[in-house]
Amino acid sequence: MTEQMKRDIEWLRSLKESGHCGEGALESNFRAQHNDRINRIIAALSAPSSPGDGWEPRPSTGGQATIIDGKIEISIDVAALPMIVNGSCLCDSMEGLWKVTDAETFAKEVCQALNDEHEDGTTRVHMMFDAAFMEAINQGAEGIEEVDEEAFVDETARLMARPLPAAPSPGGDHGA
């Protein structure tokens, strides 16, 4: 059993024991209605397995952020979308209960939603990064410092004078 699977099992056990997943989650009727199903999932994931029983460990496929070639890259395996959506429903992160019926098609729709621009040009990706910036700062991140207005104006002028990085090359499917 992989370390990720052990963490997943522990997470499911904590859901069962605590009755919540995040603030206010699983305190709904969903938990009461699906208690037996959650218990079966935990039992199945906790069951020992051995070579030849059809069980193969899988690497983590959901929600990874890494730095590759000087870029922050965020990825989830399209094949993992059904499980990720299911987990979001379990944690009451989504309104209603949903089942992914075509992961490739749904992935394109999710990319479109992530890249949709508001009137000011921001996207959900921008908002996600803004929230992550503040979370990192609030957790004591290194490599960043708070400055006064004058220093901020100077830094802004310096950054505006630099050429923009090259645009990504076309060819990737970015939900367009």
Image (cartoon, rainbow, N blue to C red):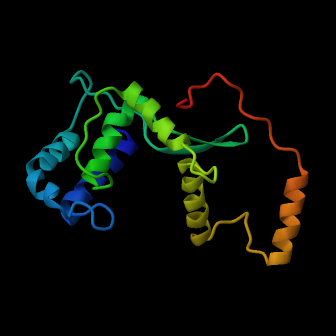
- What residue lies at 61% left-to-right and 61% top-to-bottom? 133
**x%, y% of residue 69?**
72, 37
Q: Can you tell which quarter of the image residue 150 is in? A: bottom right
- What residue lies at 37% left-to-right and 39% top-to-bottom? 2
**Residue lying furthest bottom:** 148
Q: Report the number of discs.
A: 0
Choose between 90 and 10: the one closer to the eye: 90
**Picture quarter with the C terminus:** top right
**x%, y% of residue 15?**
24, 58
47 shown above or below 124: above
**x%, y% of residue 19?**
20, 64
**Picture quarter with the N terminus:** top left
Left or right side of 83 for 176? right
Choose between 23 and 120: the one closer to the eye: 120
70 shown above or below 94: above
Q: Can you tell which quarter of the image residue 59 is in? A: top left
Left or right side of 117 for 89? left
**x%, y% of residue 22?**
33, 63
**Residue lying furthest front:** 119
- What residue lies at 16% left-to-right and 49% top-to-bottom? 38
- What residue lies at 28% left-to-right and 52% top-to-bottom? 95
Left or right side of 35 for 55? right
